[in-house]
Amino acid sequence: MAEKSRIAEKIVAVRESLGLSAEELAERAGCDLALIEQLEAGELAPSLAPLIKITRALGMRLGTLLDDDTAVGPVVTRRDEAERVSRVKSLETSSDAGVLDFFSLAAGKTARHMEPFVIDVQPSAAEKHTLSSHEGEEFIYVLDGAIEVEYGKATHTIAAGDSIYYDSIVPHEVRAAAGAPARILAVVYAPF
């Protein structure tokens, strides 16, 4: 019963957050209203077929409904609550582009497809740089200072207030520009 109750609570929470009535959800999902009401009340053991229809109608993944996380909806991270994730030398362990301090902005969001970070970029004395390459996309917005993004054979200098969006499969590296620290907002998408 606890499993049905958790799923029922998630369906209700997401439906209500979208401003949908049970009738509207039933219509969107192509299910009977009685089925939706019984699922939400925890009176009916959910089967896969209607759950797939319901999750699609709610715009969520089936896994999000079935996983153990009880949180649904947005994750708000306050200014002083960003969780420090790691301190690494660039995104590649072999790189000498400087130290990057990552602060996760969505640590509490499960089943996410994007990774948002605030990153403090410290300068490096290295003259040679190793570029990284991986599937996905990256978006960077410079908050303070300036960075250099080496992307393929080109280098772009991005200053405070500027942004860059690129395919990560192209060899690239992000580093502080002009030997001064910078702070960026980075959103990384890496497909499963």
Image (spheres, grey):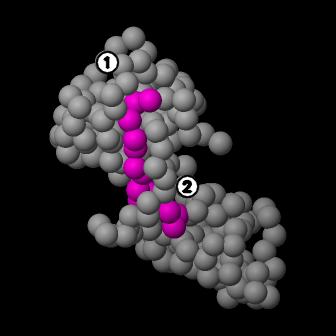
At horizontal 81% and vertical 80% (from top left) the residue drawn is 45
Q: Position of residue 73 (x, y in %)?
A: 49, 69
Q: Residues within 10 Å of mark 1 (few under 14, many from 20)?
A: few
Density class for disc 2 (Cα within 10 Å; few <14, some 14-19, many ≥20) is: few
Which is more toward the observer, 50 or 189? Answer: 189
Can residue 144 be found in the magenta stretch?
Answer: no
Q: Is residue 50 left or right of residue 86?
A: right
Q: Which residue is mark 2?
A: 112
Image point 48% across, 44% down: which residue?
Answer: 88
Residue in view at x 20 percent, y 45 percent: 144
Please determine whether, in this image, residue 45 is positioned above or below residue 136.
below
- Residue placed at 23% from the left, 31% from the top? 179
Image side of residue 81 versus residue 89, left or right: left
The relative height of residue 35 versus residue 150 in the rendered view (above or below) is below
Residue 69: image quadrant is bottom right
Q: Quadrant of residue 128?
A: top left
Q: Are marks 1 and 2 in contact (CB under 8 Å)?
A: no
| Quadrant occupied by the C terminus | top right
Taking 47 as reference, is 35 left or right?
A: left
- Residue at the front extreme? 125
Callout 2 amino acid: Arg
Label 2: element kind: loop
Residue 67 falls in image quadrant:
bottom right
The residue range painted magenta reads: 96-109
List x then y, in percent, for residue 171: 49, 21
Marking on residue 122: none
For mark 1, what is the residue? 155
